[in-house]
Amino acid sequence: MKSISLVATVAELEEATKELQSLQVLSSQIGCSLERIQDLMECIMCHGSAILENFPDSQQQQHNSIVIDEIIDVMYKKGCVMCSDINNLNRDCERVDLIDNWVSIPLINTTPQVFNWPQVLNYIIDKLKTISKMFDGLSKRAASDKLPNSKGLSVLFNFYSASVSGLANQFNISVRTIFLEYKSDRLYKSLDKEVIRQN
């Protein structure tokens, strides 16, 4: 599984939502924009289901990488990532796929690529929370308008907000359950040793 499908789709959804926010009037003329958002929402939910189905089922320590963070950020802003876009790519190259001059982040359950899961999803969780707030703002804005379709738009945007927020929460629960912070893991081990020593 490649992370770019989810990352690129969430980036496109944020862009489409920003375009709606920029409109002076939320009227029936936004039909094409709503169709695009509906398609993106369906794609994100499909990606989300696939990710949750393929998520690691055993606890792992979390190993963050500056290089992976940089790749995800470029991926979100540009889509496809070239080797020349990333500094110090050789540092964690075993965690990425290099095809010709292109870089991708695999989401698989073998070491060391398994450590990509929390970094990709934590990035996406933050973006989904932002998008959820954007939809919530659009819902409130539509509710205050006095146009024929305002009430329906308000309900629709509220549904989108709840759906995006729900997926973010599912991702968050999965990451927190499976991936342990390294510092916490070390703390638990040191406490165990202390208890054994005292006994």
Image: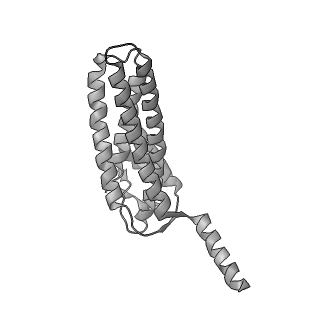
Image point 46% across, 46% down: which residue? 125
Q: Is residue 100 visible?
A: no
Apparent side of residue 179 relative to residue 35 in the rendered image (left or right):
right
Apparent side of residue 199 relative to residue 69 in the rendered image (left or right):
right
Q: Quadrant of the N terminus?
A: bottom left
Q: Is residue 189 above or below residue 150?
A: below
Q: Quadrant of residue 41?
A: top left
Q: Quadrant of residue 18?
A: top left
Image point 38% across, 25% down: which residue? 154
- Percent position of residue 6, x then y: 35, 47
Q: Quadrant of the C terminus?
A: bottom right
Image point 39% across, 29% down: which residue? 17
- Percent position of residue 148, x then y: 32, 14
Q: Is residue 102 above or below residue 128?
A: below
Number of callouts in the render?
0
Apparent side of residue 36 relative to residue 26 in the rendered image (left or right):
left
- Front residue of 52 and 69: 52
Image point 57% across, 65% down: which residue? 182
Q: Is residue 57 above or below residue 98?
A: below
Q: How is the image coloured?
A: one colour
Apparent side of residue 32 relative to residue 123 in the rendered image (left or right):
left
- Front residue of 38 and 152: 152
- Percent position of residue 92, x then y: 47, 60
Q: Is residue 102 visible?
A: yes
- Front residue of 195 and 71: 195
- Percent position of residue 45, x then y: 31, 45
The residue furthest bottom is 199
Q: Quadrant of residue 27?
A: top left
